[in-house]
Image: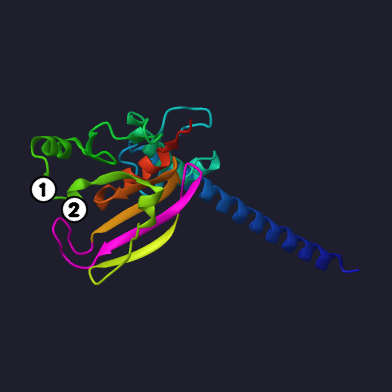
Amino acid sequence: MNWKKILVYGTMIIVILAVILFLTWESKNEIVIQVENNEIQCQEYSENECPDNCIVCPPCEACSSLGCNSAEFCEGIGFDREWYEMVKIQRKTIDWQTYINEEYDFKFNYPNYWDNYLLSDTNIMFAPQEIVDELERYPGGRGGGKYLTFIIRYYTKDEYKDYTRTGDEFTDISTGDISIDGIAGDSFELTALADAPGVSKGDVSIYYIIPHNNGYLEFNLIDNQYIDIFNEMIKSITLLYD
């Protein structure tokens, strides 16, 4: 047996293994340093200034404070971007006021800087305070259209028999399903194909209709710039029963 060759080969194997181990350690060390550097860079920002490559989350799983941290850190303790988006929504809606309709048995939350205006016995409008104030000073306001913002209507079963939402040369329509407080209903999305009084080409109106209280409730968003607020109001709807 050639002990010299064995010694040489053995030494070469040891050196190769040592190099591999060193490179592996170096790579892991670089990753750790990179994560730590990202953490430091993210923490330099406030919550409101947190850049896109960072995430706002608590500094620990049981902590209540929030700060800007790296995505790796936040996701590692169970907080992702969607979690913070939910926090922002909750903050926006936490001081909302509650509207209760005892006649048609439903309630929901709406912004504290909005108000409501009774258009008729079965139609009530919700809009920013300045719009409601103008309607109260000058009934009729700007003549309808987007100005009416968000309207809730009640239909009896007989009235609903004649209910139709169809498209034409001035309006494109798409239909779908909706669920409000566990009750299935229909959704209609109307897009204006041309300018009209109170409406501009491209404007979108949304209608959600559900059966309730021996009739039907319609939730109609007319001014689509409030779509995020509308979605939160719809989520907060509670149907009341005798």
Residue 235 x, y percent position in the rendering: 42, 42
Residue 238 x, y percent position in the rendering: 44, 36
**Residue 145, numbered circle:** 2
Q: Residue furthest right?
A: 1
Q: Is residue 37 visible?
A: no
In space, the residues marked 1 and 2 are separated at their CA atoms by: 8 Å
**Residue 182, numbered circle:** none
The amino acid beneath tag 1 is Arg
Instruction: Report helix, strand or loop for mark 1.
Output: loop
Q: Which residues are magenta?
A: 178-202
Q: Is residue 177 visible?
A: yes
The one of 103 and 198 positioned closer to us in this rendering: 103
Determine which quarter of the picture holds residue 120.
top left
Badge 1 density bin: few <14, some 14–19, many ≥20, Cα 10 Å: some
Residue 209 x, y percent position in the rendering: 39, 50
Q: Residue at x 38, y 51 (%)?
A: 158
Determine which quarter of the picture holds residue 100.
top left
Query: In this rendering, is residue 197 above or below 230?
Result: below
- Could you tell me if the residues under marks 1 and 2 are in contact, i.e. CB atoms within 8 Å? yes
The one of 215 and 99 positioned closer to us in this rendering: 215
Name the residue tied to disc 1.
142
Query: In this rendering, is residue 119 above or below 13?
Result: above
Badge 2 density bin: few <14, some 14–19, many ≥20, Cα 10 Å: some
The amino acid beneath tag 2 is Gly
